[in-house]
Amino acid sequence: MKTIALKIKSSDISKYGLEDVESVNFNELVDKISRDLALESLKIAQKYAKATDLSKLTLDEIKAEVQEFRNESSS
């Protein structure tokens, strides 16, 4: 295994809970960043859904939309 040094902004050190860490496994860091990006994407999607009233769709309406999309895609 190889060790490398990374420059990380102070705000990101706090954001990912790395203040008291001497070293971190690369996969752990990737997981932390991936979770943060996924949460950010979810918040954007929720904001868009609310702004366009998609958040008000019922489960039956969602299923109908999905089925319509599948039918269009298969033809």
Image (spheres, rainbow, N blue to C red):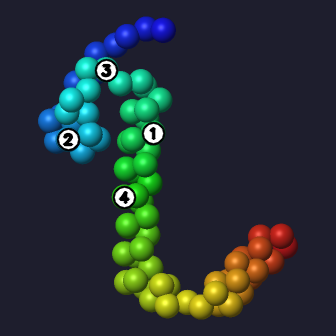
Ranked by sequence position, the earlier of labels 4 and 2 is: 2
Task: Give the label on residue 11, or none.
Answer: none
In what element is the residue under mark 2? helix
Assign a secondary structure to mark 4. Answer: helix
Pointer 2 local density, CA inside 10 Å: few below 14, some 14–19, many at least 20: few
Are the two marked residues, 1 and 2, in contact with CB atoms closer than 8 angstroms? no
Q: In this figure, which residue is indicated by the disc labeled 1?
A: 31
Q: Which residue is mark 4?
A: 40
Q: Is residue 62 above or below residue 35?
A: below
**Residue at disc 3, secondary structure:** loop
Q: Which residue is mark 3?
A: 23
Seen in the picture, residue 30 relative to 46 is either above or below; the reply is: above
Camera-near label (3 vs 4) is: 3
- The quadrant holding residue 68 is bottom right
Residue farthest toward the right in the current orientation of the protein: 75
* Upstream in sequence: badge 4 or badge 1: 1
Calculate the distance from the C-alpha at mark 1 to the C-alpha at mark 2.
16 Å
Mark on residue 14?
2
Q: Is residue 29 left or right of residue 74?
A: left
Residue at 26% in and 20% down: 22
